[in-house]
């Protein structure tokens, strides 16, 4: 009895660990990502402190959510640290293609559609597959702007569909 349950659990785990759907050979029209820039701020200077936003659970983040997080954090950093006082980087790329099988609604919809027959679906959007503790955003800053970067990452985390944590990658001794 116990062996049967263990085998069933392993089978269910295999079903959940599906490979990412990113083969663009089979899709006629792939949707574009709305992310405008992946690197913002001062790209040439080396900053002593690096702060990152990491997800707590495995999640799929849409390109719209990543763009909203980028806009929110970039706005705060530009206001508080200036245009050249930081370097903001998006560290995930939305590869996974989201498909949807559009269902007709209203009067006479049952005559028009075929239900779940040929339900491959149309490509609608793209999303980034993130693992546990993967870093999504990173801000490089001077030590005096640490609290501003923390606030910017907190606002960015509110735009994402998962709870996040703020991690200091570099320069933890300079902050204290």
Image (cartoon, helix red, strand yellow):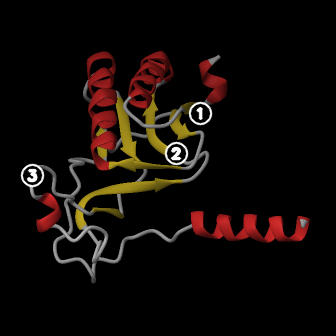
Is label 3 in a helix, a strand or a loop? Answer: loop
Residue 20, quarter of the rendered image: bottom left
Q: Which mark is residue 107?
A: 3
User: Which x, y percent locates residue 173?
Assistant: 67, 25
CB-based contact (under 8 Å), mark 2 and mark 1? yes
Q: Nearer the viewer, mark 1 or mark 3?
A: 3
Query: Which residue is most to the bottom?
Result: 25
Residue nearest the observer in this picture, 175 or 68: 68
Badge 1 or badge 3: first in the primary sequence = 3
Residue 54, quarter of the rendered image: top right
**Is 173 drawn above or below residue 11 in the view shown?**
above
The answer to whether any part of residue 164 appears in the image is yes
Q: Quadrant of the C terminus?
A: top right
What residue sits right under mark 2 in the picture? Answer: 135
Is label 1 in a helix, a strand or a loop? Answer: strand
User: Which x, y percent locates residue 120?
Assistant: 29, 73
Q: Which mark is residue 167?
A: 1
Residue appearing at x 21%, y 49% in the figure: 34
User: Which x, y percent locates residue 28?
Assistant: 17, 77
């Amino acid at each position: 009895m116990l062996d049967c349950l263990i085998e069933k659990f392993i089978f269910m785990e295999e079903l959940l660990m599906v490979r990412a759907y990113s083969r663009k050979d089979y899709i006629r029209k792939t949707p574009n990502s709305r992310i405008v820039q992946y690197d913002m701020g001062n790209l040439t200077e080396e900053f002593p402190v690096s702060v990152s936003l990491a997800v707590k659970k495995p999640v799929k983040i849409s390109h719209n959510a990543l763009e909203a997080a980028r806009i929110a954090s970039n706005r705060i950093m530009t206001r508080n640290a200036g245009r050249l006082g930081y370097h903001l980087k998006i560290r995930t790329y939305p590869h996974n293609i989201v498909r949807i099988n559009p269902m007709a609604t209203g009067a006479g919809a049952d005559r028009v559609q075929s239900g779940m027959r040929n339900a491959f679906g149309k490509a609608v959007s793209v999303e980034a597959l993130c693992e546990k503790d993967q870093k999504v955003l990173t801000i490089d800053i001077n030590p005096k702007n640490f609290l501003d970067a923390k606030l910017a990452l907190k606002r960015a985390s509110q735009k994402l569909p998962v709870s996040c944590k703020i991690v200091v990658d570099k320069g933890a001794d300079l902050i204290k």
